[in-house]
């Protein structure tokens, strides 16, 4: 999927960036005030140095007393040491502020990402999101936010004071020293679009490399099985070549601008030397004033460079701002109501004429779904691949909201509950048993303070995970790697089930259990033990079961048979068997699959 922002012609303006950054600056008012004060102090010390230097030179020419010259030299030493100390404090404070604001950027954007639904998140590549949260924020935007801005402020203040002093000393010579300014401004304006275009290509190239790495490591087993290592190495090499070329072009643009800037500034100094030297020869300017003027001319180089570089980094920051702001401003598909009702489940769950599609113009995945499930009962969803089984339970979880119709608990639309409240009574074991790079125990507990180790072990016993854990040297403390790669499919499914039911054991939650094909990797004996334990230990839990196994489906109090997003049959097992309809057809296919004749399972 391509980045959403790639087609945008304007990636942001200084007005937009500063409007966005102001929200973060407000929480750092004191630091920013200190930076401003220290900038003024540094400027005062810096512009004072050439004045005392002028006094020393003129004193030597006019043969002032030694003690007076020594005092001027002492002042020079103190001014130099003071300027160095203040400059160090400035740099340290800017760096500290950079890091603090960067952390706020990242935390706020990450918090918003966790609020987004699966459909929205799937529209971004993983590597691209990682790049936006790391390189865009750390290397580009956070530096500009404080260091880049205050370097420019420091440059502007220093430039202003230097020019005031220079014009007071000699207006003609001061005017000549300003000759580089319009040239530098014109140089930036001429290259502005080039900077933007190359920075944009660079960030996309960095995203592409990170995305390639994520895809490669996530699918490392498949790559090895199909012997595609060489192909991946070539692909990574191409991605890196593209990134290097983008980096080089960006550096070339910056380097050409900075070098031209320095060259122009040096030419300005040369003009001051020529004109100033001529004025000294004519007697219109003292030697001390000429030396001070030349020092000020050299001092102009840094503020002019800082101001020019500010606009370069602003253009680079505008690209990163647009990429980061897009993630921060992304809207969640579902949210909490203004006045959420307290969750209560005592009677039934009702789907009333529910239809759902992922987009306005997309085909409906579910159409006219109507059924009711009493508390403590089990409903099984059965149908071919893509018929909408998982989508249906996602509506109960409010990962999506229905396009039309309603889902209610005890007569209250689930949209009227807070998301946290609704999901607190639901345990979910997804079709893909996703585990995290942590210990088995922590994957079961999953950062829930109310769940202790004993409860987690009990959940493992119910899900038949305990017998597997005993085979590991470190037991429940075994680290399982990214996405649980060190565990088998069946072990991952048992760990996922233990995570779903552990709150029921600890706190009486969940009251609703959603099991999405969680026994597909288990043998028949283990599956029977799992259901036996669930029925004994969690007898009153309301259960949604998605499975292709006939033995699992038959355990339900109600079976919903889906086809093309619609319920075509519903009832108990024997009732559906007596109808001899679509349910029977599906069962026959599943029986053949279970007997090993190779027909594709209808999961």
Image (tube, helix red, strand yellow):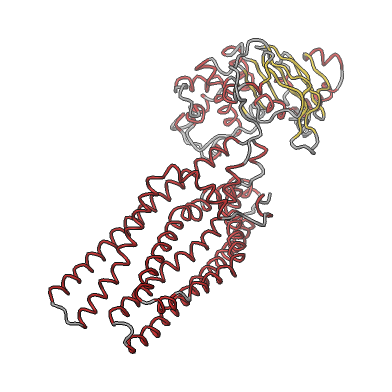
In the rendered view, tell whether residue 434 sits above or below residue 303. Answer: above
Check the image and name the residue furthest to the bottom. 281
**Which residue is located at x 55 percent, y 55 percent?**
14
> Number of labelled discs?
0
Of all residues, the one furthest to the right in this rendering is 580
* Residue 290 % position (x, y): 32, 80
Front residue of 576 and 424: 424
Which residue is at the front of the view, 122 or 185? Answer: 185
Q: Is residue 198 above or below residue 274?
A: above
Q: Residue 337: horizontal and vertical position, in percent? A: 62, 25
Q: Residue at x 45, y 80 (%)?
A: 267
**Quarter of the figure that contains the C terminus:** top right
> Which residue: 68% across, 19% down?
413
- Judging depth in this view, the residue of 38 and 96 nearest the camera is 38
Identify the image quadrant of residue 528: top right
Residue 137 x, y percent position in the rendering: 51, 50
Relative to 276, 130 lies left or right: right
* Position of residue 172 in the picture relative to residue 242 (left or right): left
Q: Position of residue 192 (x, y in %)?
A: 59, 65
Question: Taking 372 as reference, is 141 left or right?
Answer: left
Tell me which corner region of the image, top left, top right, bottom left or bottom right, holds residue 366.
top right
């Amino acid at each position: 999927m391509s980045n959403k922002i790639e087609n945008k012609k304007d990636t942001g303006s200084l007005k937009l960036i500063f409007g966005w950054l102001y929200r973060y600056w407000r929480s750092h008012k004191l630091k920013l005030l200190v930076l401003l004060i220290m900038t003024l102090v540094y400027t005062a010390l810096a512009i004072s140095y050439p004045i005392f230097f002028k006094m020393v030179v003129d004193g030597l020419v006019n043969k002032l007393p030694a003690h007076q010259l020594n005092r001027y030299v002492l002042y020079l030493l103190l001014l130099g040491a003071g300027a160095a100390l203040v400059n160090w404090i400035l740099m340290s404070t800017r760096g500290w502020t950079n890091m603090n604001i960067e952390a706020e950027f990242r935390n706020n954007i990450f918090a918003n990402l966790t609020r987004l639904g699966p459909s929205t998140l799937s529209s971004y590549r993983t590597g691209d999101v990682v790049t936006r949260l790391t390189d865009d924020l750390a290397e580009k935007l956070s530096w500009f936010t404080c260091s880049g801005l205050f370097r420019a402020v420091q440059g502007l203040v220093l430039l202003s004071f230097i020019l005031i002093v220079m014009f007071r000393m000699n207006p003609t010579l001061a005017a000549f020293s300003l000759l580089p300014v319009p040239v530098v401004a014109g140089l930036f304006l001429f290259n502005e679009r080039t900077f933007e275009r190359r920075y944009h290509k660079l960030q996309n190239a960095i995203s592409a490399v990170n995305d390639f790495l994520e895809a490669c490591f996530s699918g490392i087993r498949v790559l090895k099985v199909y012997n595609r290592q060489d192909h991946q190495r070539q692909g990574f090499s191409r991605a890196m070549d593209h990134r290097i070329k983008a980096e080089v072009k960006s550096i070339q643009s910056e380097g050409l601008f900075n070098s031209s800037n320095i060259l122009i500034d040096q030419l300005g100094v040369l003009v001051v030397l020529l004109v100033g030297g001529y004025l000294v020869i004519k007697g219109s300017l003292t030697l001390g004033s000429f030396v001070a003027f030349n020092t000020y001319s050299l001092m102009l180089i840094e503020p002019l460079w800082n101001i020019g570089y500010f606009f370069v980094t602003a253009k680079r920051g505008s690209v990163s701002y647009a990429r980061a702001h897009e993630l921060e401003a992304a809207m969640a598909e579902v949210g909490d109501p203004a006045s959420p009702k307290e969750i209560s489940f005592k009677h039934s769950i009702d789907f009333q004429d529910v239809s759902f599609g992922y987009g306005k113009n997309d085909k409906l995945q579910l159409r006219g779904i109507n059924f009711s499930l009493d508390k403590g009962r089990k409903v099984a969803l059965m149908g071919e691949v893509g018929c909408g089984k998982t989508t249906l339970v996602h509506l109960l979880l409010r990962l999506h909201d229905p396009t039309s119709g309603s889902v209610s608990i005890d007569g209250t639309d689930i949209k009227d509950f807070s998301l946290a409240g609704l999901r607190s009574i639901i345990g979910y074991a997804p079709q893909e048993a996703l585990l995290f790079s942590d210990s088995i125990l922590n994957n079961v507990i999953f950062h829930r303070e109310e769940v202790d180790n004993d409860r987690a072990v009990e959940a493992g016993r119910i899900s038949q995970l305990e017998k597997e854990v005993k085979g590991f040297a470190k037991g429940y403390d075994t680290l399982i790697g990214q996405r649980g790669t060190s565990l088998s499919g069946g072990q991952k499914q048992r760990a996922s089930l233990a995570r779903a039911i552990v709150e029921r054991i600890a706190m009486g939650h969940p009251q609703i259990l959603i099991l999405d094909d969680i026994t597909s990797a288990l043998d028949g004996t283990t599956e029977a033990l799992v259901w036996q334990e669930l029925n004994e230990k969690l007898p009153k839990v309301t259960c949604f079961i998605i499975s292709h196994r006939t033995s699992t489906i038959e355990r339900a109090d109600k079976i919903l048979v889906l086809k093309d997003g619609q319920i075509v049959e519903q009832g108990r097992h024997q009732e559906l068997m007596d109808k001899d309809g679509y349910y029977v057809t599906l069962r026959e296919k599943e029986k053949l699959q279970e007997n090993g004749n190779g027909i594709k399972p209808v999961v």
